[in-house]
Amino acid sequence: MRSKGRHRNLARLPEIAGAVVSYVYPRFAFRRPPELDGAARRYPVAVVGAGPIGLATLIDLKLHGIDAVLLDEDDTVSVGSRGLCYAKRTLEILDRLGVGDRVVGKGVTWNVGRTFLREQEVYRFELLPTPDHKRPGMVNLQQYYLEEYLVARADELGCDLRWRSRVTVVAPHDDRVTLTVATPEGEYTLEADWLVVADGAKSPIRRMLGLDIEGQVFQDRFLIADVVMQADFPAERWFWFDPPFHPGQSVLLHRQADSLWRIDFQLGWEANPEEEKKPERVIPRIRAMLGPERPFELAWTSVYTFQCRRMKDFRHGRVLFAGDAAHQVSPFGARGANSGIQDADNLAWKLARVVHGLSPDTLLDSYSTERIEAADENIMNSTRSTDFITPKGAVSRLFRDATLELAREHAFARALVNSGRLSLPTIYTASPLSTPDRDVWSGGVPPGAPAEDVPLDLDGGEIWLIDCLGGAFDLVLYAPEDAARATAERWAQAHDVRLTIIAAERRTDDPRTLVDVRGRFAERYAAAPGTTILFRPDQHVCARSRCWDEAWLTDSLARACGQCIGMATTSAASPKAVVTSSLGFRDPTIAHPRPFSAADAFYEALIDAHRGLDEAESHALNARLILILAHAIGDVGALRKALALARPPGPLSACKEAP
């Protein structure tokens, strides 16, 4: 079901140079299913694939009162680091599922990333530039640990996990899905009302159903090496272009748990994957990077190519696809596992409402709508990063190298350096579940966006808003008048909505009220007294208002429950504003801007203009472009200054061509 590998010789890694890595791969027991003894039953949901996405879906369904069954052909966790970087939003989801503390406690926390051209740093970023967040910007942890923690949590909840159970036939029907399952003790048939497919990028079930996945396969190869060593490198993300130890290519370094380090070497399309994985090829590359004196041990290697592609639709009747089975991106930006876990977060509460009869099954159409929007955003950013890291032609390489050279001295060019824009949760701007803003908002968290965490005070102790949300619909009122508060309490009880009151300052008559003592809620949500915000069970905002309005709120809840899907609605997005970055780049197409989105669109437009042109045509285009831009500047002094910046003291020492 999943591509986990079969390197059983890695069950215990060696002790070297004082570093101890002793992860023992667990073996999960096969338990004879009741269907083999004739005790057949129909399950509300079957999940195929026991990777992070399938396990997260299983656990989330259980928390919503759905007893699903999970099937996987293997009996252990993934081999090698694989999915590695877990972003803040994913950590918040894992908190809700009950494994966040274990992941953060075991993993390596980091917030800083650095990019180098050869040996010189040309760009630095910080994921959480502001304080007062419960979780860090990113945690690195080998995927096998995450899967182990999720399996333990599923067992704790009494979930039905079936190991060594391979799905061989899938037969969708109008009212159910029938599966044929092969086990060590024979085959059986299993029926489920719904099927969630999370069986990986090569998805056997997707192929069984004859469904396509479309997109772009990139012609480059990268070597992953998990290396055990003692090193004093800081817990940061380091990315090199054209380093002296691997000239003409790029290298990425991440620290992991257990003194394990992940190194990704760009190899080029012509590299032989099987040859490059051999120790006699890998060890010299690592030694060139680390130096001859530092001891290390190889723990795991793999060579990968990557693609940016997705299915046309994530829902096919009663079959729903999630994670890599539905969409795939390059590894630059940590968008794969993070996006997949957010698929599970989006899907589980909707599926639970449908199974419980609380919403029509058209609610599941919004899963495909919203997560396709997320997949397209991830594919766009992943493609842009890949195009920068691995230029596809002479002109794109020329622009890339020029950007890196300029970034050494000039801040504007640093925004264009793209070694992977890191995962951010998608704002569902086109969601049919969101109620459009009717008030004027300057900032805040718009409909479709996930909750922004803030610290609050409860009777002198600190509590986090994110821990008060999720698993149900939540209504948050900020500094309401007493009459509105009483009305809200009655409304919330009548509609089975959880109510949270946040006060602007401490009230001696009500020590149980949450207090925004640091002002972060007012700041991050653009809240004023009376502000009302409705959150979905996945902690995304679905409606907000400047004042209490019971009729509006009732309509907003109905929309968020899927009662309005299929009806003509206006977009939930606020009017689009022209976005101007601090470095002068503008993008008028973005409703809710992302960091660097305008800079990336600017760079992409330059590269796209040259696609399909030969060298002479590209030179002519550049000449015309310079003349047009010089005319647009209209300032001879500014033009001369720009020309001086563009002209290096000597010939451009461009990065070497890839072999």
Image (spheres, rainbow, N blue to C red):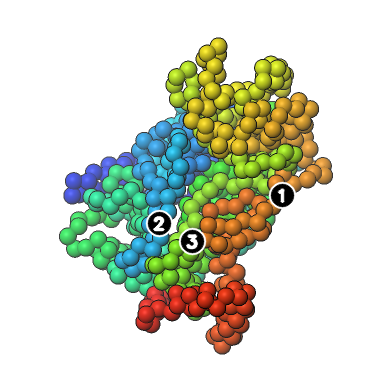
Residue extending furthest top?
A: 509
Q: CA distance from mark 3 to mark 2?
A: 10 Å
Reading the chain from its start, which is encountered first: label 1 or label 3? 3
Residue at 17% across, 60% down: 293
Residue at 74% across, 29% down: 553
Residue at 52% across, 20% down: 506
Task: State the residue position of label 1.
Answer: 575
Q: Is 118 drawn above or below residue 423 in the view shown?
A: below
Residue type pointed to by label 1:
Pro
Task: State the residue position of label 2.
Answer: 124
Residue type pointed to by label 2:
Arg
Query: Is mark 1 in CB contact (under 8 Å) with mark 3?
Result: no
Left or right relative to 243: residue 197 = right
Q: CA distance from mark 1 to mark 3?
A: 26 Å
Reading the chain from its start, which is encountered first: label 2 or label 1? 2
Q: In this rendering, does residue 469 appear at all?
A: yes
Task: State the residue position of label 3.
Answer: 415
Residue extending furthest bottom?
A: 616
Q: In this rendering, does residue 32 appear at all?
A: no
